[in-house]
Amino acid sequence: MIVFKAEKELKNFSYSVSFSSDSQITALFAPSGSGKTLTLQMIAGLQKPDSGEIEVNGKTFFSSERGINLPPQKRNVGYLFQDYALFPHMTVKENILFADRDEKLFKEIVELLEIENILNKFPSQISGGQKQRVALARALIRRPEVLLLDEPFSALHREMRENLYGELLSIIKRFNQRAVLVTHDFEEVLRLSEKVVILENGRNVQEGEPEEVFLKPKTVKIAKLLGHRNFLRGKVVESGEKFAVVELKGKVKLKLRRRVPLNVGEEITLSVLPMSAASSPAGKSNRVEVFVKRIEKRGNFLYLKVEMAGEEVELQLPVSLTPNYILEEGKKTTLHLSADQICAIREEE
Amino acid sequence: MVLDPEALFSIKLSLKVATVSTILVFLIGLPVAYALAEKEFPMKNLLDALITLPLVFPPTVTGYLLLLLFGKNGFIGEILYRFFKTGIVFTWYGAVVASSVAAFPIFVKTAKSAIEAVEKNLIYAAFTLGKSELETFFRVVLPVAKRGIVAGLVLSFARAIGEFGATLMLAGNIPFKTNTIPIEIYSAVSDGNFERANLLTVVVAVLSLGIIFAVNRLSQRGTP
């Protein structure tokens, strides 16, 4: 269990974040400059909040009320720094054993991370992916209360990331390790965590289970952070138990799964996810006539820019589905959009 | 051309003075450099300015101030005289003090930038791995900043070898006692003994070239 509540006034930045999480991996998601790293540093004891309370697995790390502020040395956190922070003058082995000389655990971790063959090399002689493994090994060897992961994948290229996601998950499960993951990539959040806290400008603006947060963003601003692109205004014309229908400009009607309370007659913002066109037409709930402005093929997807209800909308279509459609730039076509991939956003002020 | 005993003495003395002052400067300067680089404390800027003063003061002025401080009626001089029945004025210790004060800012400035250049996250990493600030300093900061610190030491040694003005004020020009190479060259030229001046100049030139090579090698060598 992690309980975090902290306020800090900095030059040009006011920070006030509170969340609690019982998940094995908690993600802190935010654009850069919103206080993600500061949060990790506060958990690690490298930055001191002006006031608040930080508790990990029942241990109080910091409490302004009770006058507790454990030094970083006494908190036993495993910190994986964004730049890995490997000691350049030590070999891989010396780096890992810097903290602790538990030979048995050392052997186990080294085997698990497959770094046996680079133990005598210096950090400058190994690749980025290897550096990350070494940094992870060094963070794990003290069996920390919590593993703090500061954008662990941002410096690695896509393919390597894919491999490491699975590896990191299995290691965290293997050591039954609690972790806080900081990232600005929501795909990472979806892949790795069970709970996400979204930070914006030093405030936590939304939290919850990642899929749910992704489909139920509280505001358009948050939705944009999460990667939503297509926002359309409309009026609720039907609101049932599971589905609702919203009418857009030009009498275009869209059926969507009802995830937030929707009242007939109210104005609402819809977010049509680019992937809403991506499942098979049979399962689609909406047939919408659109005007195709641009088609671009990237990998296994077609990226479409279409005009729908007077607005420009970006959609992704798997190449395997294209035989179902007649697609040509500058022509009209009918697309099928899934009601599950259309979200209603109620701006709550 | 052979060096006479007095000139030989001056070479030995200069090496001794420079070595001792470099060690002193290292021992006192390193914690100061660390504090200036990593710590926030009141009057930090004032301390920084005071340390820098000998770099901008005319050496004779530095020497004069040291004379006021270490003379029999000076603050430190009186303590030394009262409790230890000794003084440093007109002794080779005086030359050490003068050289140390002159070399101190050079070392502190160089070491400070070397320590500042150590990635903050390396220090943080050591802290989160349970290491105290002292252990972090010796096992992480010092080895990573090593090259800059050693370069600072070499430059300090060079400055100490070349110290003239302050040394003359504090230690005087006493043959077989306080006549360091620069002072000996000054005496030789005043006496019109250009052969001795030339010889000693060659010695200084060789020493200086050696130092320049050492600094260059240090700054060219890549990190391990």
Image (cartoon, grey):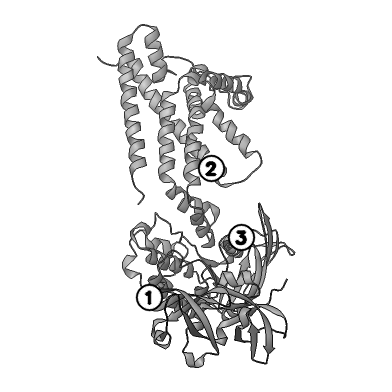
User: Disc 1 to disc 2, how far (Cα)?
Assistant: 58 Å
> Which amino acid does the dot numbered 1 rest on?
Gly
Q: How crowded is the residue under tag 3: few (<14 C-alpha within 10 Å), some, or many (20+)? A: some
Q: Tell me the SS state at disc 3.
A: loop
Q: Residue tagged by mark 3?
A: A71
Q: Mark 2 points at which residue?
A: B31
Horizontal relation, residue A71 to residue A261: left or right: left
The reply to whether the C-beta atoms of the residues labelled 1 and 2 are less than 8 Å apart is no
Do marks 2 and 3 both belong to one polypeptide chain?
no
How much space separates mark 2 and mark 3, taking CA atoms? 22 Å
Cα distance, mark 3 to mark 1?
Answer: 50 Å
Can the viewer see residue A58? no
Chain letter of mark 2 equals B
Residue nearer the viewer, A43 or A31: A31
Which residue is the site of mark 1?
Answer: A299
Q: Is residue B67 left or right of residue A110?
A: right
> What is the x, y in percent for residue A309?
58, 78
The first of marks 3 and 1 along the sequence is 3
Q: Mark 3 lies on which chain?
A: A
Q: For numbered disc 1, what is the local secondary structure?
A: loop
- What amino acid is found at the position of numbered circle 3 in the picture? Pro
Q: Which residue is drawn at 66% across and 41% down?
A: B42
Q: Position of residue B202 (x, y in %)?
A: 30, 20
User: Which residue is located at x 40 percent, y 64 percent?
Assistant: A131
